């Protein structure tokens, strides 16, 4: 019996597979991986690091589709079951009041977050270098763009799914203009989604799989034990960066306070579609679906900067694992 640990809605049609018999893993891969192939649409070189949410009894999402000129673009998509997707061949054209901000150069690694009355989209947006773009949609057809949240350079902007003490909250990872060899997770708050401040440090890098840089992944999941944060951590090997998936619990009211943080990764690149692709050895989580009554969680992650994959876990099992293996 699940303990009703997740504070949230029921999602009875969450895509789901039970843990394979004999598995030691706390997070296990879908047997259908990769669920989105690199060439699902005619224009794509690769589709990966993408965000999925429940939408009108079905599912919708914003997808990172790098085109065949290797431009990084955002595309909208829909699915009845969260597994089989129809992705628009044309990229999202954001409507923006200010042409300087609305000028699209590149966009990647989207996150989508339902807050109050709409779906907010955050992504890595080029404005004199990478920073955090912010927009919203009601229907995944028309998208509006707001001000960038921060000055460049920044990546991995991840909103919380509700206001905390009246303020919108966003995690981010200040970076540089290239393949940043450092990076901690910070949090900022906003009264209006435009002005962001009160920046606080959340987590630093620490040895092993998360020793080079870390960045928030899916929208944090509210639980009775704290905000469940799934994130990526990077190790620099003699053959380049290795991206793994980790997890922590943050204080519900003061989410810059880390309550538990798992020493072990919860998934590392081991399957062929994570180890072979345009960028080898990458698992990069950007979204999670959760079903509160059963505690089921389905994570969407990019494999090797090439394909979209799914993995499953159960909240009580994952939280026990984080606590048992915490620093
Ligand atoms: C990061 C981002 C991600 C990518 C990762 C591995 O800097 O560009 O989109 O998955 O590198 O290449």
Image (tube, grey):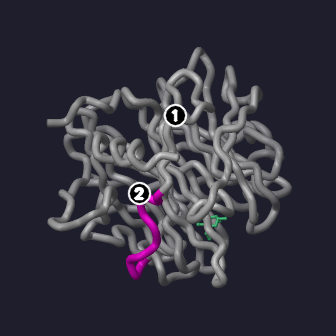
State left or right for residue 132 relative to residue 231: right
Does residue 11 appear in this view? yes
Q: Mark 1 near ligand 1 (CB under 8 Å)?
A: no
What are the residue bounds of the magenta stretch?
264-273
Residue 300 numbered tag:
2
Residue at x 69% of width, y 25% of height: 190
Q: Is residue 265 magenta?
A: yes
Disc 2 and disc 1: Cα gap in Å?
25 Å
Residue at x 42% of width, y 78% of height: 273
Residue 143 numbered tag:
none
Image-quarter location of ligand 1: bottom right
Magenta region's main secondary structure?
loop
Query: From the viewer's perspective, is residue 42 above or below residue 313?
Result: below
Among numbered discs 2 and 1, the one appearing first in the sequence:
1
Residue at x 33% of width, y 58% of height: 27
Provide the secondary structure element on which disc 1 rests: strand
Q: Name the residue under label 1.
A: 259
Provide the secondary structure element on which disc 2 rests: strand
* Residue 257 x, y percent position in the rendering: 60, 31
* Residue 61 x, y percent position in the rendering: 44, 51
Query: From the viewer's perspective, is residue 55 above or below residue 238?
Result: above
Residue at x 56% of width, y 67% of height: 243
Q: Residues within 10 Å of mark 2 (few under 14, many from 20)?
A: many
Quarter of the picture holding the N terminus: top left
* Nearer to us: label 2 or label 1: 1
């Amino acid at each position: 019996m699940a303990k009703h640990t997740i504070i949230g809605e029921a999602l009875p049609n969450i895509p789901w597979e039970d843990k394979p018999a004999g598995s030691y893993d706390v997070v296990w891969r879908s047997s259908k991986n990769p669920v989105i192939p690199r060439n699902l649409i005619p224009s794509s070189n690769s589709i990966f690091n993408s965000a999925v949410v429940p939408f009108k009894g079905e599912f919708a999402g914003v997808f990172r589709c790098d085109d065949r000129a290797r431009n990084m673009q955002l595309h909208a998509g829909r699915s009845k079951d969260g597994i089989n997707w129809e992705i628009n061949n044309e990229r999202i054209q954001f409507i923006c009041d200010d042409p300087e901000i609305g000028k699209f150069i590149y966009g990647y690694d989207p996150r989508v977050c339902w807050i109050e009355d709409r779906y907010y989209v955050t992504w890595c947006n080029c404005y004199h270098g990478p920073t955090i773009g912010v927009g919203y949609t009601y229907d995944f057809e028309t998208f509006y763009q707001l001000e960038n949240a921060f000055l460049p350079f920044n990546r991995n902007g991840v909103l919380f799914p509700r206001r905390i003490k009246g303020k919108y909250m966003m995690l981010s990872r200040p970076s540089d203009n290239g393949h940043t060899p450092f990076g901690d997770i910070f949090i900022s708050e906003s009264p209006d989604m435009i002005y962001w401040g009160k920046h606080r440090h959340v987590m630093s890098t620490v040895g092993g799989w998360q020793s080079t840089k870390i960045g928030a992944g899916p929208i944090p999941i509210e639980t009775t034990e704290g905000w469940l944060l799934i994130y990526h951590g990077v190790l620099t090997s003699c053959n380049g960066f290795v991206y793994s998936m980790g997890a922590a619990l943050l204080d519900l009211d003061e989410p810059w306070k880390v309550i538990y943080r798992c020493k072990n990764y919860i998934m590392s690149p081991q399957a062929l579609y994570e180890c072979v692709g345009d960028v080898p050895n990458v698992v990069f989580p950007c979204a999670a679906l959760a079903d509160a009554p059963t505690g089921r969680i389905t994570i969407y992650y990019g494999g090797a900067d090439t394909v979209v994959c799914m993995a499953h876990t159960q909240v009580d099992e994952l939280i026990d694992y984080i606590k048992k293996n915490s620093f």
